[in-house]
Image: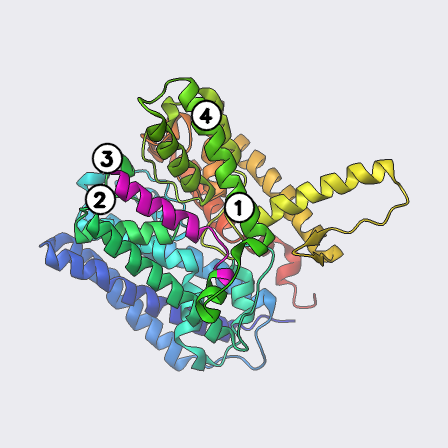
Amino acid sequence: MDLHYRTIFKVIGLVLIITGIAMVLPLVTSLFYGEASSTRAFLYVLLPCLALGFIQFKFIHQSEGRLRLRDGFLIVALCWLLISALGAIPLVVEGCFKNYMDAFFEMCSGFTTTGATVVSDVEALPKAVLMWRALSHWLGGMGILVLAIALLPTLGISGQEIVEAETPGPVLSKLTPKMSETARGLYTIYILFTGAETILLLFGGMSFFDALTHAFSTVGTGGFSNYNDSIAHFANPYIDAVICFFMIMCGINFNLLYVFFRDRAVNFLKDQECRIYLIFVAMFTVAISVWLIVKDTYDNIFTSIHHALFQVASIISTTGFSSTDFEKWPSFCIMMLLCIFFIGGSSSSTAGGVKVIRVVVMLKMIRRSIYLKLHPSALVHIRYNNRILSTDVVQGICAFVFLYATTFFAVSIFISLDNFDMLTNLSATATCLGNIGPGFGLVGPTENFSIFSDGMKFILSLTMVAGRLELFTLLMLLTGKFWNPNE
C-alpha cells in the first residue's frame, strides 16, 4: 500500500510552524540581552520555517484514508531529523560552532534529550543559544509531534499512529477516548512540572534565566547546563535536591502521573515498573554511597549520599546532569553507574535507555527459563501488573533488547576507527544510544564529544535519534519492504 505522502507533508508543515514559533523564545532572549548577531541568526530560520510551514499546512490537501503505522514511522523519522537539521542553522549562522556537523550533533543531542555536547566552553555561548539548547530538550522530551496533536486536533488526522511511532516504551496507554485529549493532558502535567521547578529553583538563588533553562533540561531529562561544570557550579544542596526530585519524577511513566492528576489519587507502588524503578534508584544509591563512605571519598556520610543519589537519579532518568566529577570515584562506583546506563527510566516517560519494563520482563524470562529446566512440563506465564503478557509483547521486548545490544556493539566498533580508548568508545556509544549525556574517559562529565571526527559525530547523531525513537522506527526506513507499495 502506498504511503500517504500529502498528509505526511501536511504534518511536516505543522511541525515547521511549531519549530518557528519555538524559536521566538531564543529570539526574545537575544533581544533582551542585546545579542544582535543571535537575533539575526534566529530570524534567518524562524521566518522561512513559518512561511514554508504555513504554505504546506494550508495548501496541501491530505490524502484520502487514515494514516497507517508505516506513515507514522516515516513522519516521526523525518520530523526528528528535520528539526535537528533546522535547529542547527542558527548556531552556525551565529558563529558559535566551527562547522555545521558540530551544530547538527548539538541539536540532535538537544531534541533527543541526550545532553552530549561538543562545546568546550559552554559559558561563552550567547544567552539565546543557551536558551535554544535547553528549549530543544523541553520540546524533545514529550515529543514535538505529540505537541502538534495536542494543539491541533482539528487536523483531521489520527494521532495514534504518530504517537505509537514516537513514544518511548513497549506499552502505550490511551487514557482518553481521543488521542488529542491524552496529549493535552500529558502536556499540562509537563508544563506544571516545568513551572513548579522554575519557581523552586528561584527560591534556591538561581537567576530566572538559569532557573527556566535548567527546568527545561530537567523536565525533558536532557542535561544541557549553562555552565561547564553542570550543576556542580552552584554547589547548593537545595538546588541539587530540587533537580534530583524532578529527575526522578520525570523518569516515571507519565500515564501514572496523568491518572494521579486526573483522579487525585493513585498508588504508584501498585505499578510494577514504577516500583522496580524506585527500587533501582534506592539500591544503586545505597551501593554507591556505602563504597564512597568506605573509601573516604568525601568528608562526611551525608555528602556521599547526596552525590550518590543525585548521580543515580541523573543517569537512570538519562538526564545527564552532574553534581560532582564522578570519574574521580572508586572504580566500583563507576561500574555501578555504567550498569545504570543500560536501564533507563520508565516507559512513556521523558527518559531514554532500554526502559525498566523491558529489564523486568527480561529478568522474568531468565527466571522462567531456569524454572523450566527443573520442570520441563510446567506452564509458566510472564506477568506484568498481574496480567499475562502476550507472546507478541514478550517477543517484541526480546527483539528490542537484542537489537539494542547489536546496535551498541556495532556503533562502538565503528567509532573505534577514530582510535580512542575502549572506555571512551563504549561509553560514548552507550550514552548516545541511551540518550544519557556524559560518558566516561575522554567524554566524561568534564569533557565533551569534540574529539570525534565529523563522520563519527554524524554516526553518533543518528545513534541518538535512533535511540530516542526506539531503534525500529529509524532502522525500518532502511528496509526495502517499507518502501514496497505491495507489502
The N terminus, quarter of image: bottom right
Q: At which x and y percent is residue 408? A: 56, 37
Query: Can you tell which mark lies on residue 277?
Result: 1
Question: Which mark is first along the chain, 4 or 3?
Answer: 3
Question: Which mark is first along the chain, 3 or 2?
Answer: 2
Q: At which x and y percent is residue 425? A: 47, 29
| Circles 1, 2 touching at the beta carbon (< 8 Å) | no
Identify the residue at image location x=53%, y=74%: 176
Q: Is residue 37 magenta?
A: no
Q: Helix, strand or loop at disc 4?
A: helix
Give the amino acid at mark 1.
Answer: Tyr
Question: Which mark is first along the chain, 1 or 4?
Answer: 1
Query: Does 299 sit above or below residue 94?
Result: above
Identify the residue at image location x=70%, y=68%: 486
Please name the residue that numbered disc 3 is placed on: 235
Cα–Cα span, label 2 and label 3: 28 Å
Q: At which x and y percent is residue 412? A: 52, 32
Please name the residue that numbered disc 2 is placed on: 96
Question: Over which residues does the magenta segment extend?
Answer: 236-256
Identify the residue at image location x=39%, y=74%: 151
Cα–Cα span, label 4 and label 1: 20 Å
Cα–Cα span, label 3 and label 4: 22 Å
Please name the residue that numbered disc 4 is placed on: 290
Q: Is residue 246 magenta?
A: yes
Question: Which mark is first along the chain, 2 or 1?
Answer: 2
| Circles 1, 3 touching at the beta carbon (< 8 Å) | no
The answer to which quarter of the image holds residue 484 is bottom right
Determine whether, in the image, residue 389 is placed left or right of residue 58. Answer: right
